[in-house]
Image (cartoon, rainbow, N blue to C red):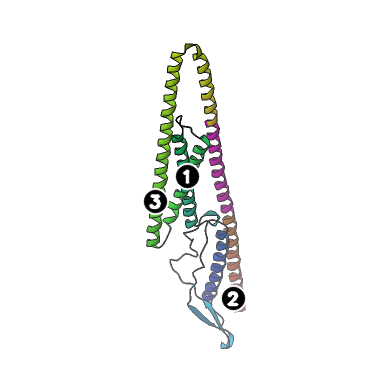
Amino acid sequence: MPPSSDELVKALLWVAQRRLGDRLNRVFRRSSYRPRALERCSDQWNVRGLGGKHNVRAPEIRQEKNLLFFPRVMAIEGGTTLSEIYQSSKRLLLRMRDGLERLERLEFSSSTGFDSPELSFSIKRDIAQIQSLCAEMDRLWRSVTSKPQRDLWKRKVEQVSEEVDSLKESLDKHFLRNQKRVLEAKERAELFERANGDSSHILRIFDDEAQAMQSAHNSSLMLEEAYSTGVAILSKYAEQRDRLKVMQFETWLIFFTMVGFFSLIRFSFNRENKKC
């Protein structure tokens, strides 16, 4: 006897499930997720063909709580893993620590306390980058399914965050010492003006020009930092928009495929009813 309508519906739903899972896997493979293989049932059922000469085996659709796919918790945008982010943060920490040591050597090597604005800006930029990486790692380690691995990554991320906070505190102390040194130099200049009244006007002019140049340089660095941050944010939004467009297109394609399947089922039922 031919297969019943329930068996045909089960078989068509299974085919649709396979196609849906494959398409979603291809979509997410190009995005921030890397799906695992689909969960497939091992149970099978037999359908006897006409005259009992043929046996057709097909998987049965089981109602479970499992999803069609599972994202890999160790993957983020661009295929970068949690371990790679951690290694990048450690490299940035080493570079930032080396930069702080260079700043301290420059500070204590000369009596005037020479400072490098470019090096300070580079360290600030590294701090901001490490903080963003820590936020990303903090989001990723919570998705790890294994509890020992999750606890291990939690400790690692907390250690990186503590090191960043410590280095940031050291940099702030350096800036405070530098500001104090500038104030002391300004006070000495004022005392020198009082002792040399003839040259007070010239010293004031040079001091105003130096302050204006320093202010312009600091403003330029701040504008560059704000521009780089804005470009990064806009690029993230553009990537998310493209991903949503692809997912919407795939969803509509699957929907029309299901409509075609059900239309085929209805047509087969109507034809059998006419034969009967």
Dominant SS in magenta? helix
Q: Which residues are magenta?
A: 218-245
Q: Amino acid at mark 2?
A: Asn
Q: Amino acid at mark 3?
A: Gln
Considering only vertical position in the picture, is 161 above or below 174? below
Where is mark 2, residue-wise? 273
How far is mark 1 from mark 3, CA to CA?
A: 18 Å
Where is mark 3, residue-wise? 159
Q: Amino acid at mark 1?
A: Asp
How far is mark 2 from mark 3, CA to CA?
A: 72 Å
| Residue that appears at 55% across and 26% down | 213
Determine the image quadrant of residue 144.
bottom left
Determine the image quadrant of residue 30.
bottom right
Nearer mark to the viewer, of 1 and 3: 1
Percent from the top left, x then y, of residue 109? Answer: 46, 35
| Residue that appears at 47% across and 57% down | 83
Secondary structure beneath dot 3 equals helix
Q: Residues within 10 Å of mark 3 (few under 14, many from 20)?
A: few
N-terminal of the two: label 2 or label 3? 3
Is 273 on the left-hand or right-hand side of 92? Answer: right
N-terminal of the two: label 1 or label 3? 1
Question: 271 or 246: nearer the eye?
Answer: 246
N-terminal of the two: label 2 or label 1? 1
The C terminus lies in quadrant: bottom right
Is 224 on the left-hand or right-hand side of 108? Answer: right
Percent from the top left, x then y, of residue 146? Answer: 40, 63
Secondary structure beneath dot 1 equals helix
Nearer mark to the viewer, of 2 and 1: 1
The N terminus lies in quadrant: bottom right
